[in-house]
Amino acid sequence: MTGFGKQNMAVLVLREADDITTVLRQALATAPAEERPGLERAMALTAEAGAVPDAELRGRWALRRMASTGYDGPPRTVAAIKALRTAERSLSLLQAVNLSKDAEAVAMEAQDGRAAEPDAS
C-alpha cells in the first residue's frame, strides 16, 4: 500500500499487483499446457498495471471523482477543485489542488496520446 508523500492525504493508492503476481506464478507452476498462455498473459497485464505511477493513479481517480459530479471541464480550475471537494467532502483545499495537478497531467497525457495516434481514415 502506498500513500501520498506530501501532506496527510485522504486518498490511498492500493497496490496488490505483487500479491496477484505471486498467486499467478504459483498457478503457472502447476498449470497444464493449455492454461499456460492465459496465465502468462495475466502475469504480463498484472506487471503492466503494477508499473503505473502513483501520481497517475491519483490523477485518474480525481478525474473520475470530478466526473461523478457532472464536471467535465479542465482539471486545474476552481470549478474542478470544487467538483472534487463536492465528490469527496473529506479533502482539504490543498489536497484537492494537488489532486487536480495529478488529474491535469493524466488528462494532458491522454490528449497527447490521442494527438500522436495516426488518422484512421
Image: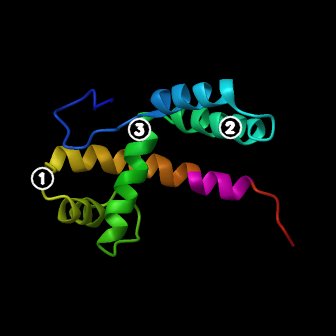
Which residue is disc 1 drawn over?
90
Q: Which residue is mark 2?
A: 39
Examine the rendered structure and indicate whether residue 116 appears above or below residue 1. below
Q: Quadrant where the C terminus lies?
A: bottom right
Please state the horizontal and vertical placement of residue 21, each as a whole percent of the image.
55, 29
Query: Residue drawn 33% across and 29% down?
Result: 2
Q: Which residues are magenta?
A: 110-116
- The residues tagged by marks 3 and 2 sit, at their Cα atoms, a distance apart of 29 Å
Q: Answer left or right for 98 relative to 28.
A: left
Residue underneath mark 3? 55
Dominant secondary structure of the residues highlighted in magenta in the image: helix
In this view, 86 is above or below 30: below
What residue lies at 29% left-to-right and 72% top-to-bottom? Answer: 69
Q: Residues within 10 Å of mark 2 (few under 14, many from 20)?
A: some
Question: Does 83 lie within the magenta span?
Answer: no
Mark positioned earlier in the residue sequence (2 or 1): 2
Q: Earlier in the sequence, mark 3 or mark 2?
A: 2
- Cα separation, mark 1 vs mark 3, equals 19 Å
Relative to 76, is 10 on the left or the right?
Answer: left
Mark sitting earlier along the chain (1/3): 3
Tell me residue 65's x, y (percent).
Answer: 32, 61
Judged by depth in the image, the label closer to the viewer, 2 or 1, is 2
Report the amino acid beneath label 1.
Answer: Ser
- Residue type of the residue flagged with mark 2: Leu
In what element is the residue under mark 3?
helix
Q: Are marks 2 and 1 in contact (CB under 8 Å)?
A: no
Instruction: Give the quadrant of the N terminus.
Output: top left
User: Mark number for residue 7?
Assistant: none
Q: Amino acid at mark 3?
A: Ala
Identify the secondary structure beneath mark 2: helix
Mark 3 neighbour density, 10 Å: few (under 14) some (14–19) many (20 or more): some
Identify the image quadrant of residue 79: bottom left
